[in-house]
Amino acid sequence: MIPEANHKHLEPFYELLERISHRPVRWPAVMSRGIAAEYCSLSVSGFDQWVREGRLPPPLPASKRWSKGAIDRAIAKMDGGSCLSEEHDEAMLLDKWLSERHV
């Protein structure tokens, strides 16, 4: 969906949004087990296995929620950071674009 001429300044936003539209634009900072599993592209049982093995962090204290930041750090630690590259870069570009326009 490319904007009409009077919205030309939004074109980069729409192009980026189209590239990442098959997944949420922003993942929540704190996620349920199911959402965290989806974020990691794992089944819930696979996610549980990775948590048991220590590959991924346990839930936040006194909760059944996971920190997105803790998951990101655990994944980056596993591969030296390359797992996060494309999706992470696109999300950062979108965040930057939105903040520059005070959206």
Image (cartoon, rainbow, N blue to C red):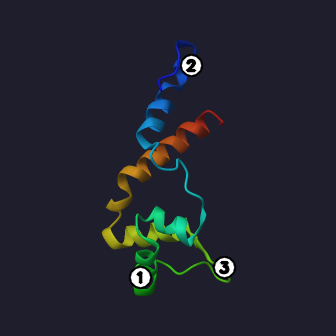
Rate crowding at label 1 as few (under 14), some (14 to 19) or many (20 or more) other CA atoms within 10 Å: some
Identify the secondary structure beneath mark 3: loop
Q: Is residue 37 above or below residue 56?
A: above
Identify the secondary structure beneath mark 2: helix
Which residue is rendered at x = 57% and y = 13% of the image?
6
Q: Are marks 2 and 3 in contact (CB under 8 Å)?
A: no
Which numbered disc flags the more N-terminal residue, 2 or 1? 2
State the quadrant of the C terminus.
Answer: top right
The amino acid pointed to by label 1 is Gln
User: Disc 2 and disc 1: Cα gap in Å?
Assistant: 47 Å
The amino acid pointed to by label 3 is Ser
Residue, disc 1? 49
Residue, disc 3? 63
Give the foreground label among 2 and 1: 1
Identify the secondary structure beneath mark 1: helix
Q: Nearer the viewer, residue 65 or 46?
A: 46
Q: Tag on residue 7?
A: 2
Q: Please state the horizontal and vertical placement of residue 99, each as a whole percent of the image.
A: 60, 40
Q: Is residue 64 above or below residue 99?
A: below
Does residue 22 appear left or right of residue 85 in this picture?
right
Q: Please state the horizontal and vertical placement of residue 78, each as a whole percent of the image.
A: 34, 73
Which numbered disc flags the more N-terminal residue, 3 or 1? 1
Rate crowding at label 3 as few (under 14), some (14 to 19) or many (20 or more) other CA atoms within 10 Å: few
Does residue 79 appear left or right of residue 9 in this picture?
left
